[in-house]
Image (cartoon, rainbow, N blue to C red):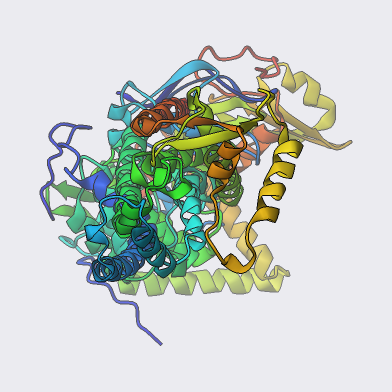
Amino acid sequence: MTTVDSSVPGRGGALPRFGLVWVTWRQHRFAFYVLLGMLAAFAVLMVAVGLQARSTYDQLGLGRCASFAGDRCQRLRMELFDWYPQQFPFLFLLLLPAGFGAITGGPLIARELETGTYRFAWTQGAGRTRWLLTQLLLIAAVLAAVAEAYGALYTWYNAPLDHVMRFGFGDYLGFELGGIVFPVQTLLAFVAGVFAGLLIRRTMVAVGAVFLGSFGLIAALVFKLRRYYMTPLVTAGKISPRDWVVGRAYVDPTGHLLDTGQSHILYVKYLAQLPSSGDGPSVSYRDWLQARHYTIVTSYHPAGRFWTFQFIEAGWMGLLILLLGIATVRLVRRRIG
Amino acid sequence: MSAAIETSGLGKRYGRTWALRDCSLAIPAGHVVGLVGPNGAGKTTLLSLAVGLATPTTGQVRVAGGRPAGSAAALDAVAFVAQEAALYRNLSVADMLRMGRSLNRRWDAERARGRLAELDIPPGRKVGALSGGQRSQVALTLALAKRPELLILDEPLAALDPVARHDFMSALMTAVSEDGVSVVFSSHVVAELERVCDYVVVVHGGRIQVSGEVEELVAGHHVLTGPSDQADAVAQRFPVVRDRRTFAQAHLLVRASDPDAAPPGWQRHAIGLEELVLAYIREPSASALPGPKPAPGEQVAC
Amino acid sequence: MDVDKDGSPSPIEFRLDPASGVPTYLQLVQQVEQALRLGYLRQGDQLPRVKDVVAGLAINPNTVLKAYRELEHRGLVAGRRGLGTFVEGTLDRVGLREQAALQKSMLAWMRTASEAGLDDAGMSALFTAALHELRQSREGRPDEEGGSGRAGVVA
């Protein structure tokens, strides 16, 4: 029979150094493989197309365009734009933070409570706090890394196009994936999932609820709410390429601000006077308005605010993550069982 | 002797219902303790409190020699086998062993593997694919591999067929004889307790009704059988636990250890543990707790 | 059919009758005494190891220890530290020829009883009652420790 250190009852030694790491890994092995698999597939796609994009960029000679004012460079860049795959399908990426977070977070505690395995896990020597903290931190780290990888891959893939088109920084995917908010959103969904699982105690319900809630929140931010983080600047003049336009209003020569209906009528008027089938030069809307002494009043966030916005979003989400995390740990320690 | 489980004024309320109340116990170590009572009596609640899965509403509970239940020291010294052997069904047996090793400070991996080999349980098989008896054996192996001072089991035999039950008990008793571990297990089945338990606790309606060494309890109770018309007179002389009469014959279960206690014309019978426990369960107001003995003629009440 | 042979060093093996109403430890004591009487156990033989009994019968080890202590108390066995429990003393063994003679006289009594009109159950009841009386008369004797240890000899 083995000799085991039983000289000191109750304190036979220390916990195995990476014991809890192994436990986390073993319990989430499948999710980990799926995450990595999806990331690998995405990476292959992004790298393949991204390399082709760069070669197209070089072929088109876009490197020699200093600005894109001139006709030729304008045309070239539209060629690159047409070459690039449609952006629309990539909006599925917006589902990922909610999806990854809810699916890994929801079952973490809920499954233990539902199947009764918490009666095993929380009566072992390591105790429930260490168990929970290790799981939370390790999974959070992996999720953050994976999310960041998605961001980096997309940004790299999109770089040639972004360089020539100079999208405003509020562009949905550009903002989501070009900074730090993507991982932070994923972590928020994750912690919300864990917390919901603890309260609801039913895995499927928790996953579903958190997925819908997180995605709803993110969609609302992306399409509606993000612009309100700061008060936009207003100008009657031109804006720089990467500035984020959040509103446009038209002022007629008498100084009267047009409402939506009137703006629309104005635009229709412009369209009507355009030469049909593109014969002859067409005037831009801006120039046409200027000629008629209309002023375009633009509300925008200057390009420099990109990181400010990133930190604002990461900040309040980070606070939520902290609060939910602490609440989860405290509730678990209070021995809901 | 240190106590396996010590509680004082322990109570647990779920919502508005008290699952356990006024529970003060001092279960000694080095025994095999049977915790019995009808379903819903509070056995699982008591054990959950003892292993730290639930927090008391009132009072406190200490285990394995004064360690607060659920503390790190207690988690090291106490092993728990939950109802229906709470194990991860999708993990293999070997993975469960590894999980036990990863989560505990003291772990006898060699012995765990040896036990499973003796039981012919293949380590590669998923836990969900094992039979109920095998799962229970795995859960027991995991608990014993921790080298606990106290082993607590919640209804370990409930889902097992008779052969599996025997094998499980045999394994448990072997562990007691080899390691000297204290055992507390709950059961709503009262039969065959005497073979295994040397200390018994009866829980009924959330309260402790009986608590004591089996030998003392059995020696301290007798059934007196005699004519009903004398029953009242006889009942005055002893603390009566249970009084069963027809128009002619009466059986009085009394607490008395004096061997000459049988009145003339009455027969005195010894009583087995099973019958004794059942009698107490049927008389919820009676109790047999350590403390001052009740006076003769008194209905033994809480 | 599998013959269940274990590697136990003892010549005897215990069995339990849960329905008999006799306390477990007493059943073990009685089985050892019976084995001694019938010659299954002889001087120097080892009693089943506690752990084997416990594994086979699924009973509390303290019960086995209690039984062995009682047997030691009756002077029949002795424990040797680390080795086990071994047979030391003997019961007054009734020799085979004596047993045959006793059986013959019992048969004679049975024929008498049968002619008197007693059936099997009646004879058995009479025997049990007489045994009870014998036991009670022995218990009445002072300083008689473990009187039943000398059972098997019908005066």
Residue C56 rendering spot, x and y as whole percentages: 36, 62
Q: Is residue A231 above or below residue C57?
A: above
**Residue at 67 percent of width and 72 percent of height:** C114
Quarter of the image where the N terminus of chain B is located: top left
**Residue at 39 percent of width and 67 percent of height:** A79
The residue lying toward the viewer, choosing from A289 and C116, is A289
- The number of numbered discs placed on residues in the rendered structure image is 0
Residue C146 in which image quadrant: top left
Residue B264 rendering spot, x and y as whole percentages: 69, 28
**Residue at 33 percent of width and 54 percent of height:** A164
The residue lying toward the viewer, choosing from A204 and A310, is A310
Residue C90 in view, yes or no:
yes
Q: Is residue A102 above or below residue B150?
A: below
Q: Is residue C64 above or below residue A244?
A: below
Residue C56 in view, yes or no:
no
**B105 sits left or right of A108 in the view:** left
Residue B149 rendering spot, x and y as whole percentages: 28, 36
- In the picture as drawn, the residue positioned furthest to the bottom comes out as C1
Quarter of the image where the C terminus of chain B is located: top right
Residue A214 rendering spot, x and y as whole percentages: 54, 42
The residue lying toward the viewer, choosing from A210 and B234, is A210
**A194 sits left or right of B76 in the view:** right
Residue C117 in which image quadrant: bottom right
The residue lying toward the viewer, choosing from C122 and A49, is A49
- In the picture as drawn, the residue positioned furthest to the right comes out as B247
